[in-house]
Image (tube, rainbow, N blue to C red):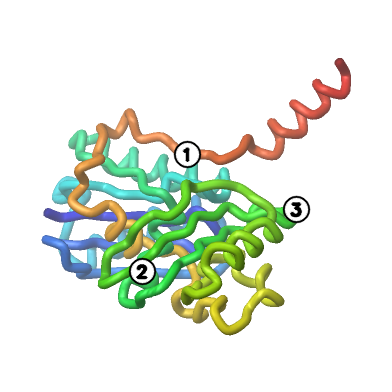
Amino acid sequence: MKILAAECSATPVSCAISVDGKIIEHSFANLKITHSQTLLPKIAQMLKKVGLKPADIDCFAVSAGPGSFTGVRIGISAIKGLATPTNAKCVGVSTLLAMAYNYIDTDCIVCAVMDARCNQVYNALFQINGGVVTRLTPDRALMCDELILEIKEKYSDKKVIIVGDGTYLFHNAADNNIILSEEERRYQNAVGVILAAGDCEAAVTPDKLLPTYLRLPQAERELKLKQERGN
């Protein structure tokens, strides 16, 4: 099976291709350039390099959220556009779950965090043991202090690695068991998306591929607040 994955839920952008479970090509950049300008050219370049066309892909995978509203939409739209001509299978995976695979070779608790602004993070906790990822919490949005308290209360005897673009928010929390991820394994990437997609059992048709948001976009939140104040 050939799987092509895209990831642009935050500042970095990446894509990857696997054939029968083996990653054969991967491209990653963190240049702070609009994903609408970089994602599809990267995918086209990658496909050309390995001698494949979109029609050769059996399943397309993408980070469906949480993450940047714009970034998630760009990723979803790009994958829909590539998959629709052949009605290929599509899989939307949790961005946070994909991030856990950055440490698939390490027995630990992965605390995946994405900066959600206002001292909040999108977060989920996962246990990795013997190369198997087990989800410990649902994807959620919560305050940084709440997350640290939860970790200290429930996992003080475990090795906890904080992964994601929100890692810097926890600099003061690092101690003997709470470890900040290494820079090269910190950010979400398309390889993790492929690993999270597995054998594409959760695949849907392109028209049913949808983003997953943990909260309303900022513009909608502000509008809702204004409406509530006006009542």
At label 1, which amino acid type do we have? Thr
Task: Name the quadrant containing residue 130.
Answer: bottom left
Q: Residue 203: image x %, image y %? A: 24, 39
In whole angstroms, how far apart are the C-alphas of marks 1 and 2? 24 Å
- N-terminal-most mark, 2 or 3: 2
In whole angstroms, how far apart are the C-alphas of marks 2 and 3? 31 Å
- Residues 48 and 28: in front is 28
- Vertically, is 215 above or below 174? above
| Residue drawn at point x = 56 percent, y = 56 percent | 34
Query: Is 173 positioned to the left or the right of 46 in the image?
Result: right
Q: Residue 202: image x %, image y %? A: 25, 40
Q: Residue 225: image x %, image y %? A: 79, 29
Q: In the structure shown, which secondary structural element does the residue marked by tag 2 occupy?
A: strand
At label 3, which amino acid type do we have? Cys
Q: Point out which mark residue 27 bears.
A: 2
Residue beneath disc 3:
118
